[in-house]
Each structure stands twice: as structure tokens, then as C-alpha cells.
Amino acid sequence: MPVSLRYVIKRIFYLFLVVLGVITIVFIATRIIPAHPEFLWAGPHATEEQLQEARNELRLNDPIWVQYVYFIENMLTFNFGISWSSRHPISQDILSALPATLELAISGFIIGILIGLFLGIRAAVKYGSIIDKFVRSLSISGSAIPVFWLALIFQLILAIKLGILPVGYRIDPNAEILEGFQPITGFYTIDTLIEGKFDLFLDVLKRLLMPALVVSVYPLCLTARMTRSLALETLQEDYVRNMRSWGVKDNVIIRKYVIKAVIPPLIASLGLSFGYALVGSFLVEVIFAWNGLGMYVVHALANYDFPAVIISVMTVAIIYSSINTVVDILHAYLDPRIRL
Amino acid sequence: MIISSRFIREYYEYLKKDKLGLTGAIIVMIFIFLAVFAPYIVPYPADAWGYAYNIEQRLQPPSLAHPFGTDVYGRDVFSRVILGSRFSLIIALGVVSIALLIGVVLELFAGYLGGRIGTFFMRITDMFLAFPPILLALLFAVVIGRGLLNLIISLSLAWWPWYARLTYVQVTTVKNMPYIDAAKIAGINTPTIIFKYILPNSLTPVTVQAFLDMGAAILEAAALSFIGIGVQPPNPEWGLMISEGWYLIGVAWWISIFPGIMLFLVVMAFNFLGDSFREFNNPKVRRLLESRGI
Amino acid sequence: MNKKAIGKGLIVIIILVVIIVAVLGGYYYSLLNSQQSQPKKTVVVYASISEMTSADPSTEFSNSIMWLAFTYERLIYYDPIQNKLIPELAVSWERSQDNLTWTFHLRHGVTFHDGSPLNADAVIFSLNRTITLGQGAAFLWASVKSIEKVDDYTVRLHLNYPAPIDLIASAAYASYIFSPKVVQYAKASNATDPKISDWFNAGNDAGSGPYKLIKWDPKNEVIFEKYSAWWGWNATDYPLKSSSAPDIFTIKIVADAVTQENMLLAGQIQIAQQVPLEDLNNLKNNPNIQVVTKPSFQQLILLLNTKKAPLDNVLVREAIAHAIPYDDIVTVARYGYARVASGPVPYGMWGHSDQFRYSYNLTLAKSLLVQAGYPNGINRKLLLTYTTGDIYEKRSAELIQSALAQIGIQVDVRPLSWDEQWALAKSGWENPNNAQDILMFYWWPTYNSPFDFLYNMFDSQSKDFNLGYFTNETFDNLLSTAVTLEGSDREKATTLYLQAQQIIYEQVAGIPLWDMTYVIAASSSLSNLDMAINPAYPTVIFPQALSLKS
């Protein structure tokens, strides 16, 4: 057995604790910090009737631990209540927005990891050269770029001024009515392929490209920076130095030793990379009119629809922790030292 | 790890040779200077604070009179961008110092006491770290409300776990040093040990880290202001200005672009400084540098 | 080690094969499809800034008017520009001498989308449901005592007091006629069963209009298909139609003006509800784009809290009225695409007068403040609320903030969601000291009469929208007299409405800021757009009037 079952169970149990913890933090933030939680839940200027309804819904007349138990029960059964800006159940809203966000975040994440890995290794091999200086300054300055601002610049140049890439929307607005496109999974790249609509698939890719590039910036910088220093460390190992002095080609060394040494610690950081991609998508969705969770949250914020915002944030935190758990297990699989 | 004045001198020597780090340091100093003196040096102070408007001058592209152009109310974007540095500095200082205070105080006790309590505190910290960056701050901002002060509070509440973890590691290291054992044997009471021996030695690296984190704090604050829950108009915060200019990006790009450049430069400068500090601190890289005579 | 490598290679190959098969298969399939495809349907996409609300024609009182207006029909269609009533479902109508009875003769040969015929029963069923439910704009029918079926195609309304039933029957809300079969479809027990509402809100329509609802996704898009059996396509007495109207009309929710503009330029939408006005000159120079402007009845107005110090002092209110740079606000907020308002009745509506404009005069404003006993300005921040998300309101509010600062009045400008803004404002009837000082909001008419503006915003009985808590008996009496004359003596009614507005003007109960000019940017491939827009039905584009150039 590559990873002991005990380790997996332990990690999953730990994930469960973290999820409970996240829910608890949300509970503390929304019920204990505000003096009158019903105002947060029903809007600061709701009518007495609405407030009473919210008080009943939140069981504010019960002791705090009873409220807490009900809160956890509601959260675990996806009973999030109704959004007062969209008037839909929040769980339904989130479910319909989530694939868009994940599609964007995953694309940006993959682009970022691949380019970052490539650049990081190049830089390490040519330590001190122009390439290295470029990669180093790119990877440091890149994480200083405000993504929402970068999105604006991309939009301004590529879409508005040059008109090369389409702006706004995940798919041709007439796809459904003219081509009979029906979302199945909500991931449009997959859906168009399943339905065999190749033109639409290209359209979806074109629309995905610009926001995904913007989202890829943070994971790219993080990966490039980590890869560079990990690869540098490996190249400093005595056996690698010896091999290099014996005239073993760089390509061979990279393939046989550097990549192998870089991948496991890099995998440990995938969770964080993905976190950056998620947050990045959150911020750029509004600019690209990308109907995901980020746009949902910004709209809810504009309408002071706090439950919708809070639940969305909680959902993302839980997704993020789950991914971190998977990453940890994966890491353990690849790096036997941490198998316990 | 103990940071002495020798260490700082060494770092200063190193910085002189590390061009990226040096650039960072210079930009950070300029930024602090601008933040302190902005109201006295900007050409149009009333525009900068947002209480003036000038219809004839609206939406002017960059020119000599208005190097960064004017916005929809005819306000000078240059003045606003410069004054924006003051808002960012206040936010960044506020966030890292409050976060530092919470994180250090909590973990100092947890780290020193160790055992169950220590583990418990670390688990709480982990819960907070389970949120992706910014989102926890967003959650608190939603609960506390909008505005500059609330923005600082919510960012700090989301930020302290990082310092808590760092302090924990530091305290655990320092705690096991022989002189602490010696102090215990000598019968010195716990608070004295904490405040006299552990605190000073654990604090320095965390504080340096906090200073370098100011760039990240500025960036997150700008992101929150951008989505409308941070600093409120008519104040000239960079993220807010970018969002205000977005509506007119096709007509008047300068309203969004210049605050973005400023934001980018300042955050980048902090990152350069932070990175150079990390490289300096990394023994393997140092060895490499020394071997190459850098 | 070896085994592992083989395993890895296998996985890579499998993934590659799957991708290649999917791509090739997809490509082949799309080739197959394109060979079979029939002539494409014509589509017009209209981008809306706001999401759609409910779908019940009886109770809806919000954004869904954008499509209810052409999925359902009224008895009468109103053209406010020519001030003409155009027969729609009713071909003719008359009122009795005492103005208490109105008789409508219905059009023959009209069918609802389900195929059932329009007749007196349907009209009575629809109006009764709307009136009984009593939600939304149902109050318009308050004067109706009973509705009588004279014969299959004649309906008679008996009133308690005279009311302009012709205008009410042409209103943008609560005026729609639908098939009585909804009871059956919804498996409801009677007309007011909530099941019918649920049935509507599940995305069903029961109208007779030129387009029928085929997709209901109110947050993202709502799609309509041409109803080929619509009576109007061939009717000679009905002008609102076109022979090349689009087969499909889509309302797409695109929440910001910048994206709307970009999508329009890219040809992905044909009509944009909002584009950044500052960019209009560029758009006008673009041969692929047309820009249509039309005066509207939508007015941005400030209601002042007349029951809370310091605005309970008419001199302070007057000072504020003279300290607002109206022309600058129109320039900044609407880039000139609005008209400085004169009185709460907008330009173009009957009963409007150009007499009620306040001058921008800071000296006068300051001296009024001195007279009022505030020589050093007001010592507390006044709270101004506006509806969040509306950039025109935002800019107007921020400009007022800096303008009032110049006479020593500090303003706290606070964006709130409409629900919140409204709830806070309504609470002012109980305790005006807890409410805002200044409320900024839009008013547009439910039906086309000055009464609608004056009553809702200023009558002491109107607790829902009189959000400055203005009470004035003379004003109330003038209104109640005028409204009963509307149906009989329009001229006398107009005089009374002008007198009522004079009171508002002198008392500064509200400060009207500007009357909006609607600006619609559209693709040049559409013609007749001008006709498809009607200020009496705000935000509606009537697709049946659009012509598509091939």
C-alpha cells in the first residue's frame, strides 16, 4: 500500500475538524461579533416583521449552544436559506455559479503551474544569467500585480483597442438558441465537447483564454519562485555538481534529478497555488462578466445581501481545505518521508 | 535565531550589492516620504481629498497641468494618486501592527506553555489559515462594515494567524535554548521568562517579516476597496480609484491605470525587499553567493 | 520502478487518446450538423442591466415589465409623444355622461398563446384577479366597483368615483390580460390561488402578445419566440409591428455598461440598455452602431425630510435647493443626456410646466441659511441615501455632497440597496428623526398622469412613497379634486395640478434634479428602433416593431 490507510483517514478526520472550524469561525463572525445578528441576516433596516422572522430562523431566543448546533446542522445539510437579492435558495445560487469559477480557476492554475515550472528550472540552470534575473524579477513583481487591474489592462488592450479576443461571457450569447447548447456539467469546455459542438468549444476556449491568463499570474509566480530555489538547491548538491563537472548534459540532469527533487515539495504548495487562483478568479470575474461565484459575491455585496456573501466565502474555504487535504495525501504518496 | 546589529549591518552590505533589493528599499522610502508629506506637496489638495470638482476640466487626458489626467469630476488624478499613498501606508501599518500584537501575544503564551494548550491554540490558528487569502478579511469586512478603520480591523483579524504560527515556531525554538532552562532552574518566574527572555528573541524575525508583509497588506486592502467594501469615496484609495475608473476604461484609461501602476510599484518594492531578505537568510543560497564572490 | 513507468505511460496515452477522439468526434459532428442546418433564425439580443423579477402579470411591479409588455397585452396602448390612445385588445371604448361607467368593445379573432380565444370572460378574469390580489400596481383600479359582461366581446366597468380608466387600462403595470385557463394549468382552485403565481414564476406565460416566453432564467437570460398567430401582424389599425421582426428575442442580463458596450461592438448583442455615456461620441461615429435618444418620464428627485431638524425649516430646504448646481449634475451624471427638471412632473407629461426650476445661486443660498438661523452652516452631517449600483445616482449624490459643502452643509452620502433604502425611509413615518435627511430616488409613472407623481411622492396618505413625510392639506385637497376631473375635464385638472406643484415648489418638499433622456445604443442592422421605445413603458423594447436588415 503506497500511502497508509491510517494516514488518509487521519487527514480526512482532520479535514472534518477544519470544516467544523470554518463553520465555527463563520458562526462567531456572524452571530457573536454583531450585537444584533438578525439585522445582519435581514438587512440593517428591515421591518419588525422581517426581523422577527429572522430571529425565529436563527433561533436567537435559544441559548447560544443550541443556536450553534442548529447552525452546524443547517450548514452540513446545505440549508443556507434564501438570498434576499436573488430570492433563490443560496445553495442553488452557489451550485450554479461554482462551475464557472472552478473552470476559470483550474485553467489559470494549470497554465500558471506549467509555465512557472518551466521558467523556474530554466532560471536555476542558468543561475545569475539574464534569464535568471528576468525570472526572478518576474516572479517577485508578478505577485505584486493587482489582478483586477491587470484584467482591466488586458481588457483594454486585447479586447477594446485591438479586438483580438472577445470580452465578457463564457460562451456565445446565442449558443443555446441557435446551436442548441445545453449546459450539462457547467464546465463549458467539457460540455461543448460532450455535445460535439466543436465551433462552440473553440469559442469557449477563446473566451476563457484572457481571464485564465490573468488568473494564472499568481500561481505562475509562486511556482516559478519555488521551482527556482528548489532547483538551485538540487544543483548545489555534491552529486549533481560532480555529474555536471563530468560533463553530463544539463537536460539529462534536469530530467533525472532536478524535476524529481522539485516535484514533491512543489505539490505541497499546490494547495496554496490553487487558493491564489481561486481568489484571483473571484476578483477578475466582475471585469470579464464571468458568471461565477466572484460575480455573485460582488453583486450580493452591492445589495447588502450578507448571507449570500458569507455562505459563498464559507463554501470556497471548504473547497480550499478539501483540496489541501487531497494535496497532502498526494504529497505523502510521492514523498515517502512524510508517510506516517 | 537572534538578530543583532551586526546582522543588520551585514544585510545592509548585502543590500548594496543586490540591485533588486536596493531598488525595493529606495521605492519603499519614497513611498513613505510621499505618504507623510502628500497633503503638503500635491498640486491640488482639494481634488486629492475629493471635496472639490471642476466641470470644465473633466476627463482631461494627461498633460503638464494634470500629469495623470483628470477624472469624471474634473479632479486631478495625480494629486489623488499621491495622497493615496497615505491611505495605503496607514492601512498597512495598522494591519501589520494589530495582527502582530494579536498573533504574538496569543502564541507567546501558547508556545511557552506548550502541551495541550499550545496544541489547542495552534489548531485555532489552523482554522483561520483554512481560509484562502483575502476571503477571511472579506468575511469580517462584511460583518463589521465599510470604511477605513473597519477595513484595517478586518484585515488584521484575518492576518494574525500567520504571525501566530511564526511566533510559535520561534518561541518553541527559543524555549529549548539552554539559557532558558538555566533561568528556570534559577527559579525565575514564568512571566519574567516570557517577557525578559523569550519575547525579545522571538520578536525580531516576526517584526521584520511583518514589515515586509506591508506590501501584501496594501494589495489586499486595495482588492477589498476595489469590490466596494473597503475605503469609501471620495477618499483616494488606489483600489477604489481603479474601480471608479473601470466604468470609463474605454474613454479615460488614465483614471484606472495610474493608481494601478503606483499600487504595483509599491507592492513590488516590498516584495523585492522581502525576497532579498529571504535570499540573504537562506544559508544554501548564501553559500552559493559566497562561492561566487557576490 | 519499471512497472510504475509503464503505468504512467499508459495513463498518458489513454488521456491523449480520449482528447483526440473527443476533438475529432466533435469536429466531425459539427461538420455533420452544419451540412444539415436549416436557414438560421433571426435573433435580437437586448442586454439588460438588471435581473428580471417575477413573472406574474397581475402583481409584477418591477423589472419584468421589460418583457411582460410584449408577451401580454393591454386593452389600450398609449403613445405619450403624440398623446394618443391606440386600440389594442379593445377596438373602441366609451364612457358614460357621469364618467362612472366605461364600456370596452373587444377585438375579434385574438388568441392567447395556448390557442384559447380572447373574450369578455378572459378580460374580466384577468382584471378581477389583479384587483383581488391587490398587489403591485393594483391600486390603479381602486375606483372600480364592479366589472360586467355585456356580451362575449363587450365589457363594462362600473366606478365608485370618476377615474381615467383609459389611461389606467394602458398602464405599464397591472393592466395585462391573460388566459383564464391558467387555473387549469396550475391545478388551482380559483383565480387567486397562489398556485397560479407559482405556475407563472416557473416560466410559463398565458398572454396574447406578439412574442411568447420560451426560456425563463431570470438571473441570466429570458428568451422569447415570435408568436406567428398574433392578430397584430396583419391588423391595419395597429402601427406597432414590422414585417421583418426577429424570430427570437433574447433579454440577456449583462450587469455593467462597459461589458454591454464591448459586447455590442463585438456584435454579440444587438441592443445595449446602458453604455458609458462618455463614450457615445465614439459610438455615434461607428458605422455599425446607432444611438437612439428619447425623452423619458423617469425623474431623479431628492425628497427632503420635512419632519426632522434642520430640514423641517423651509428656509434651509430652500437654501439647499439654490445651492445645487443642476446643470453641472446633468453634465457629470448623464453627460448631458438629461434635462434639468422643473417640478416633479417630468417634461413631456401633461401637467408639466417650466416655471418650477430653482436657480443655482450660492449667495442666495447662504443668506437663506443665515435667515434660518444657521450663519455658520449646519452642525451635523446630513444623511443622503441613494440606491446602490446606479452610477448616475452615485455621481449626482457625490456632486451634491461637494456642492453643499460650499454653503457649510456636510453630507454623508450612503448607498443602500433599494430594499434597505426604502425600509429606512418608510420608518420615518413613525419616527422621522431616525430616518434619512435626504432621499434620492427615481420616479417613473405607473400610469400616465401628473397624479401618479404628485400623489405618490407628496400626498399625506401615501405612506409608501411620500418619503419626505410632507403633509399639506391644501395640496391634498387640490389633488383629490383634480383626479376626479381627469376623466372628464382634463383642462381643469391640469390647472389644479399646476397649483399643487406650486405648493411643492414653494415648500421645497422635494428637489427634482433631472428628467432622464433614454439613450439606447444598438447595432445598425436594426431599424425602427425609435418606434420600439416608448417612455410610457420604461425599459421596454417592443421587438415586434423592430426590422432586421439582412
Image (spheres, rainbow, N blue to C red):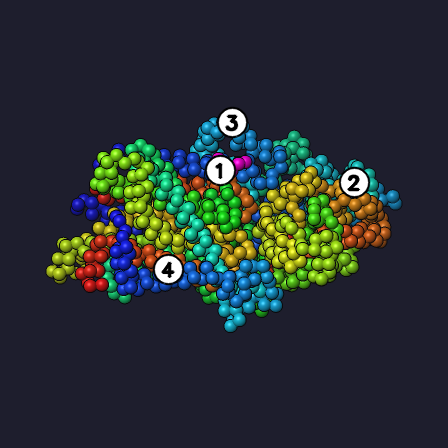
Kindly state the secondary structure of the residue where label 2 is placed. loop
Left or right: A267 with respect to C532?
left
> Which mark, by number, is residue C143?
2
Locate residue B166: give its quadrant.
Answer: top left
Few, some or many residues within 10 Å of mark 4 (<14, 14–19, 20+): many
Left-right relation of A69 to C124: left
Mark 3 or mark 1, which is nearer to you? 1
Rendered residue at 60%/62% (across/down) = B53
Reply yes or no: does residue B287 show up in magenta. Answer: no
Quick check: do tags 2 and 1 share a chain? no
Give me the residue at 39% from left, 53% from top. B214
Residue stretch in magenta: A32-36
Residues at marks 3 and 1, CA–CA distance in whole angstroms: 17 Å
Please tell me whether mark 4 sits on a helix, a strand or a loop.
helix
Magenta stretch: helix, strand or loop mostly? loop
User: Mark number for residue A33?
Assistant: 1
Q: Amino acid at mark 4?
A: Ala
Judging depth in this view, the residue of C190 and A19 nearest the camera is A19
Residue in the picture at 37% in, 39% down = B106
- Which residue carries the number 3 mark? A62
The residue indicated by pointer 4 is B269
Which residue extends farthest bottom? B64
Q: Nearer the viewer, residue C249 or C69?
A: C69
Image coordinates of residue C4 in percent, x first then y, are: 20, 45
Tag 1 and tag 4, C-beta contact below 8 Å: no
Which mark lies nearer to you, 2 or 1?
1
**Residue A176 visible in the current orientation:** no
